[in-house]
Image: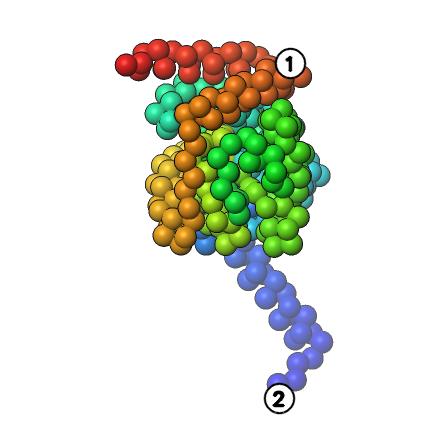
């Protein structure tokens, strides 16, 4: 066994320390980013690929450390940790951004969109305003990534508003928009953190969720439901938001690199998610989920109820700066131009 004297040990420690220090670039910035997205998903794979490209292009001066799968808590917990400096950013949903930029939820207004063609028309003209508004609120983002349409999924077929009234419907904790929408229709929703939804489904605390097909598969909620109502209730997106103060500590050159790479990554995610949702829908049907069709009369009732909710939310001051009117105007213009 090799025995070292005190001086030799001291020298050895110094050498090892110097080696470790040399492995970490001096002045390197590590962005700590949290997300609810489970590790291994295409979303995480692309973000990690973007991070690797940024690290390479900045010679290791800018790196990312991800905390996937909700281990840092829900969106509100993540925002709180960003405020105290424990995190630098998060991949957040539009609902998670509501406290720092309420207008970010404008796409999620119930029954705003009927088709993806309408979505594309509006987003091409309004995404930039949402990104700019978020930056004014203190967060740098790199474009919106489609989450898709969210549908009712339950253990029973839901064809009407009356059917939903008899269900225990989950809504995200603190989601004023979702609560207003359901309560306007006479439904008393049950708020829970995202991490508690599966347990809620297993124990019977809730029996109905509103989510996208890829969300149902990724979170394994599809194993607890039997029916999916073929009626898009709302549209949602997610984005990577980094604290503006932390981001501006980078050199202008490195800021440009991060913006260029992550903007490209989020364009890829946006495109891929639409395809993934289509494939997930097919997978759900193949695994035994039954699609429930809603009559045109019932669709009209849903839209009328949703319009009441939208007006109430607007009266409460949830949407400011004219973005609500811009959205309504764009939808109206599109439908007029495409009317048969």
- The residue positioned 46% from the left and 21% from the top of the image is 300
| Snapshot colouring | rainbow
Residue 128 rendering spot, x and y as whole percentages = 45, 21
Spatial separation of the CA atoms under disc 1 and disc 2: 79 Å
- 204 left or right, relative to 268: right
Disc 1 crowd rating (10 Å Cα; few below 14, some 14-19, many 20+) is: few
Regarding mark 1 in the picture, which secondary structure is present there?
Answer: helix
- The residue positioned 51% from the left and 49% from the top of the image is 225
Report the mark closest to the observer, 1 or 2. 1
- The residue positioned 63% from the left and 65% from the top of the image is 14
Residue 296 rendering spot, x and y as whole percentages = 41, 25
Regarding mark 2 in the picture, which secondary structure is present there?
Answer: loop
- 188 left or right, relative to 117: right
Say which mark, if any, is on residue 1.
Answer: 2
Q: Image quadrant for the N terminus?
A: bottom right
Nearest the camera: 106 or 300? 300
Q: Which residue is mark 1?
A: 315
Decide if residue 81 is in sight here: yes
Nearest the camera: 54 or 87? 87
Disc 2 crowd rating (10 Å Cα; few below 14, some 14-19, many 20+) is: few
């Amino acid at each position: 066994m090799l025995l070292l004297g005190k001086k030799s040990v001291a020298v050895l420690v110094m050498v090892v320390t110097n080696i470790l220090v040399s492995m970490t670039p001096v002045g390197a910035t590590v962005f700590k980013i949290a997300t609810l997205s489970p590790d291994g998903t295409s979303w995480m794979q692309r973000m990690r690929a973007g991070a690797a490209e940024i690290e390479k292009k900045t010679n290791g001066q800018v790196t990312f450390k991800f905390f996937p799968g909700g281990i840092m808590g829900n969106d509100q917990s993540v925002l709180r940790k960003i405020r105290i400096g424990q995190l630098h950013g998060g991949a957040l949903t539009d609902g998670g951004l509501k406290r720092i930029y309420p207008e970010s939820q404008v796409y999620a207004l119930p029954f705003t969109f009927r088709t993806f063609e309408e979505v594309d028309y509006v987003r091409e003209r309004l995404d930039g305003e949402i990104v700019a508004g978020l930056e004014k609120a203190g967060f740098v983002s790199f474009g919106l990534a489609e989450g898709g349409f969210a549908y009712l999924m339950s253990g029973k077929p839901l064809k009407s508003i009356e059917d939903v009234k008899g269900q225990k419907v989950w809504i995200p904790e603190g989601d004023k928009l979702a609560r207003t929408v359901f309560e306007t229709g006479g439904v008393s929703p049950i708020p829970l953190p995202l991490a508690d939804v599966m347990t809620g489904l297993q124990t019977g605390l809730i029996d109905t969720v509103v989510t996208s097909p890829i969300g149902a598969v990724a979170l394994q909620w599809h194993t607890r439901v039997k029916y999916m109502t073929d009626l898009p209730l709302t549209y949602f997106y997610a984005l990577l938001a980094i604290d503006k103060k932390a981001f501006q500590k980078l050199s202008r050159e490195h800021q440009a690199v991060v913006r260029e790479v992550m903007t490209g990554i989020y364009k890829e995610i946006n495109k891929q998610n639409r395809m993934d949702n289509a494939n997930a829908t097919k997978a759900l049907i193949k695994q035994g989920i039954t699609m429930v069709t809603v009559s045109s009369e019932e669709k009209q009732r849903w839209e009328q109820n949703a319009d009441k909710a939208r007006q109430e939310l607007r009266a409460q001051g949830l949407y400011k700066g004219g973005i609500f009117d811009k959205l309504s105007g764009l939808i109206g213009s599109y439908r007029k131009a495409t009317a048969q």
